[in-house]
Image: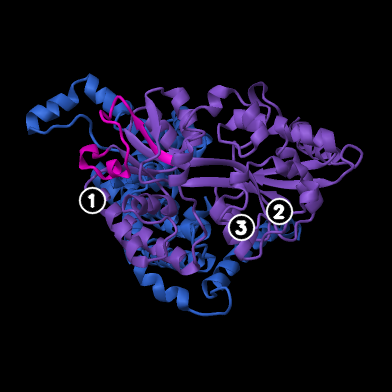
Chain colours: A purple, B blue
Amino acid sequence: MKKVLSLVLAGLLVCPMLTACGDSSSSQYPNGEVNVLNWGEYISDGQDGTLDVIAKFQEETGIKVNYNVCPDNETLYANLQQGDSYDVIIPSDYMISRLIDEGMLAPLNFDNIPNAADVDPQFLNPAYDPDNAYSVPYMWGTVGIIYNTTMVDEAITSWDALFDPKYAGQVLMINNSRDAIGVALKDLGYSYNTTDQAQITEAVNLLIQQKKDGIVQAYVMDEIFDKLEGGEAAIGVYYAGDYLTMHDNNPDLTFVVPSEGSNIFTDAMCIPAGAANQENGEKFINFMCSTEVGVANCEAIGYSTPLMSVKDALDPAITSNPVAYPSDAVLASCEPFLNLPDATLKFYDSEWLRLKA
Amino acid sequence: MKNKGLAVPYVIWMAIFVVVPLILVVIYAFHDGTRFTPDNFRVMGTYAAVFGRSFLLAAIATLICILVGYPVAWFLAREGPGMRRIATILIMLPMWMNFLLRTYSWMSILENTGLLNTLFQKIGLITLVNSIFGTNFTYFPMINTQGAIVLGMVYNYLPFMILPIFTVIEKIDPQLIEAAQDLGANSAVVFHKLIFPLSVPGILSGITMVFVPSVATFAISRLLGGGMVTLLGDLIETQFLGGAYNPYLGSAISLVMMVIVLVCMAVMNRFGEGEEEAMLL
């Protein structure tokens, strides 16, 4: 009896393997494959009746999509370094300039990406890709202060609030050296991209004081959703797109881009150097830039689109929301992250350790 | 011959997933991307505080696991088979759920507005403490402290302490205890002279199984410690996935950590004979 049972179980194990092999048969996907690496929950995937972008691409083009996700730019970089091969990646600005500097991206053939003409000119020739040769922007957004209006009785307008002792135990900082030190740099009026070690040291001293005074409750990443929505903390620093999600769950939360200016980030689609399926990658990028897919993606993930036709087609309630689409004056005050020289990155790491020691 | 054949897959598995990675770690540790150099180890002094804190917290967690786990294992070994089965399942039950989920649950238990603090408030404990000590708590700070990190380690790894001790005590021949009692030993003496010495191998393998993962943990310190301090696991992770991407230094730190752990284990094993036996269980 046991033998029969184990045979059945073994059979069950093998079954999905066989069907998986059947899936990749050339008849269903005659035009090869494309390996895509994206962030988690950063595409419209068919949940809750939204458009399943991947399925639609496969159906329209006959190209099989091998879809992968990774948590952050640094992991993506490590993956590429370790020789993982992808045809489309969606890194953020500073990582794109690092990848370009290190020769890890392939120049795009824009003949295969006609939809790139739809990109708003203000996102063309960005500082991270000055010749506009390697990337097509996918989504963008700002970083700002999110706070609970029932726990904070003033309108926060400055990064200073994060260093104010009256908010002791109420402040959540981003648990990543570039973002956290960046907050302090901006509060001191410096650039995010400074390589001046004295300025970075001054910023970290400010963070150490902030920690010593007990103002910081915790350094968090996505745990911030629970803590802000549940009123565990009053003030936090995070991304505008994620704020919109939090606001849906707790309307008492509000978002502000501090007057000193903040970070504007762009995630753009690129093709790694030596990609096996560059042309299929370009087709995928083109597909992602079409109006229908762009609208579906924006509605699903809440970030802001760089595509003009998509912005026009979106619900005006979304595009008139200053959190998702801030005014030109606010945008002008924002600064993107650029790649830092290796020595500065190492200095960031040792200063970060000084803060956390 | 037949037995050896059966071991082949295991040997291949170990070679690919244990031996090869270990060799890679050693090579990386003595490399800086362009040439072989011991430079990575020269900067190790900068991380002394991180090493110290990680080993201290792991040691505290291990000690608590022994103090809590030993009595549990002892009572368990003296229960009837039905009770044992239920208790073993209860001990194992949390481990059927993902480690991260369990740690996330502790976040909502320990938070300032979490389950425990809400409970304390409802039953008036916070008011009581404030009136006795003249303090001004609105909640008891529990999360984002080093205590919470230790709690997370104890909670997650306690079963690894209980089970080996339980297995060893269970195997002690009851006739030995009867003989000791016949010879006039009271229960304190039986425990001190007989049960405890015989259960040392179980304690030692329990220590190994709790201490090693505790030293290397990073999710617990981030979720329950609020990322306020860096532990070894965080430090190593930063080297591989942080801004400065330095797998060479990361490997060197891992190697130093492994060597320290191995030395600790070797020293400890000198105190216990028959350790191999317990390890095999």
User: Tag 3: residue type?
Assistant: Pro
Judged left or right of residue A47, residue A185 is left
Give the residue furthest to the right: A27
Q: Secondary structure at mark 3?
A: loop
Is residue A30 placed above or below A244 in the rendered structure?
below
- Tell whether label 1 touches label 2 (CB within 8 Å): no
Which comes before the other along the chain, label 2 or label 1? 1
Which labelled disc corresponds to residue A275? Answer: none
Q: How many marks?
A: 3
Calculate the distance from the C-alpha at mark 3 to the C-alpha at mark 1. 41 Å
Check residue A156 for magenta coloring: yes
Q: Residue B79: x and y, percent?
A: 40, 32
Figure quadrant of residue B212: bottom left
Decide which of A159, A29 is in the foreground and name it: A159
Residue at the spot of label 1: A212
Check residue B16 for magenta coloring: no
User: Tag 2: residue type?
Assistant: Ile
Number of the front mark, 3 or 1: 3
Residue at the spot of label 2: A271
Is residue B179 placed above or below A97 in the rendered structure?
above
Is residue A244 placed above or below B25 in the rendered structure?
above
Give the magenta part as a residue range.
A143-169
Calculate the distance from the C-alpha at mark 2 to the C-alpha at mark 3. 17 Å
Q: Chain of mark 2?
A: A
Q: Are marks 3 and 1 on the same chain?
A: yes
Q: Are marks 2 and 1 on the same chain?
A: yes
How many residues crowd around disc 2 within 10 Å: few (fewer than 14), some, or many (20 or more)? Answer: many
Judged left or right of residue B121, residue B44 is right
Calculate the distance from the C-alpha at mark 2 to the C-alpha at mark 1. 44 Å
Residue at the spot of label 3: A130
Judged left or right of residue B56, residue A87 is right
